[in-house]
Image (tube, rainbow, N blue to C red):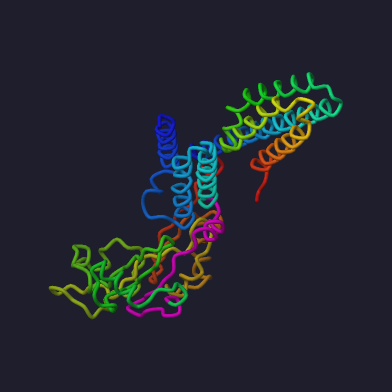
Amino acid sequence: MLILILRTVLIYCIIVFSMRLMGKKQLGELQPSELVSTILISNLASISIESPEIPVAGSVVPVLMIVSLEILISAWSARCKKVASLISGNSKIIMYRGKIDQDMLRQLRFSADDLLEALREKNIFEPMDVELALVETNGTISVCKRPGAQPMRLDDLQPPENSGCDTPSDNGKSDISFKGQRLPQQRLPKLPVIVDGGLEADTLPVLGLTRGDIDRILEKESCTLQQTLLLLCSPEKEYYFLRRDTEKKNG
Amino acid sequence: MKRVRAAFAVLILLAGFSIWGHFTVKVTTDTVESGLLRLQQAALAEQYDKADAIALELVDYCTQREELLTLFIKRDLVSSLRISLCGLQAYAKKENLADLMLELQRAQGQVHALHCQYYSMA
């Protein structure tokens, strides 16, 4: 019995150490590879506690092996976009301006009920209130509401020319007004176009942008695709640009 | 970055542990196998005192290595080999030669099973 207690304490300590080593990411929403490693770790941990005839190394070695591989693969994914999309997949747009992308829904094996349920969890009861909905790689749905559907904010009352934005293109073209102020119509948030030096080709048609537009932005910033860490664009060609930190990359 | 370094360190430790395990299991099974062969040869040459000494030597060796082997291999498998080796000494007599040969074969089978338990993928 004493051996069983010692083995349990040892396994407990190793699992706590392993989860700590894997970081806080492991405790929140899980990516597919993280889910697999969590399931495997929980099973492996129980083996040597349940069966005293099996050596402790039979649990400890595979657990530590999985933890190490998980860390190395996630570090590799953070550096290489292709590896990240191979392991975790990409986020997919399932709704745009109230319209459901049924092909994508079928591809993701989401039913309309699943989608509506996810929307209701975000306090959206009308699909038409959705400006953009994405299924993230961990299976959660992120939703951006239409301006008319979300509670009024102070920012919404500012005319576009005073808003501090770079280049609002459709100034004044709005059918919604509040206390005499025209409100921006169906303003789409900035979406990722380049992430970690990789072009998100699926996003370009949604934003109504072409590859030429992106090349022009990169030229303006004197930067290549590979040197770009993040480029978020809106249909109005407003953008947020972040260059890769070369020192960190080399370090 | 610290976590990546820690992961590399853990992998290196695991590699070291597995190499150590490989040599520990291989050396033990090879030694017991050669000991069983010597015992068989001594018994066939009717040198029963020598066979008795070899059997005792094998039991001592196996008892010494048992704790180490249980780090890598199921405890019951390691124990059963030691128990089989303990029985050999009793059969190392002229009138029990047939039984000794049978027990030797059983012990050799157990050594093989021990080897397979560590190295086999199946």
Span colored in magenta: A79-105
Task: Left or right? Give the position of A62 relative to A170.
Answer: right
Q: Residue furthest left?
A: A179
Task: Left or right? Give the position of B9 relative to A96.
Answer: right
Decide which of A40, B67 is in the foreground and name it: B67
Is A28 located above or below residue B103 in the figure? below
Decide which of A136, A160 is in the foreground and name it: A136
Is A94 located above or below residue A24 in the figure? below
How many numbered circles does the render carry?
0
Q: Position of residue B52 (x, y in %)?
A: 74, 21
Task: Left or right? Give the position of B55 relative to A9.
Answer: right
Q: Position of residue A41 (x, y in %)?
A: 46, 47
Q: Residue furthest right?
A: B45
Q: Position of residue A209 (x, y in %)?
A: 46, 73
Decide which of A124, A175 is in the foreground and name it: A124
Q: Position of residue A212 (x, y in %)?
A: 53, 70
Task: Left or right? Give the position of A228 relative to A172.
Answer: right
Instruction: Residue at 57% x, 32% y: name it.
Output: B71
Query: Is residue A88 within the magenta segment?
Result: yes
Q: Residue furthest front?
A: B95
Is B102 located above or below residue A151 in the figure? above
Question: Quarter-wise, where is residue B22 in the image?
Answer: top right
Decide which of A239, A151 is in the foreground and name it: A151
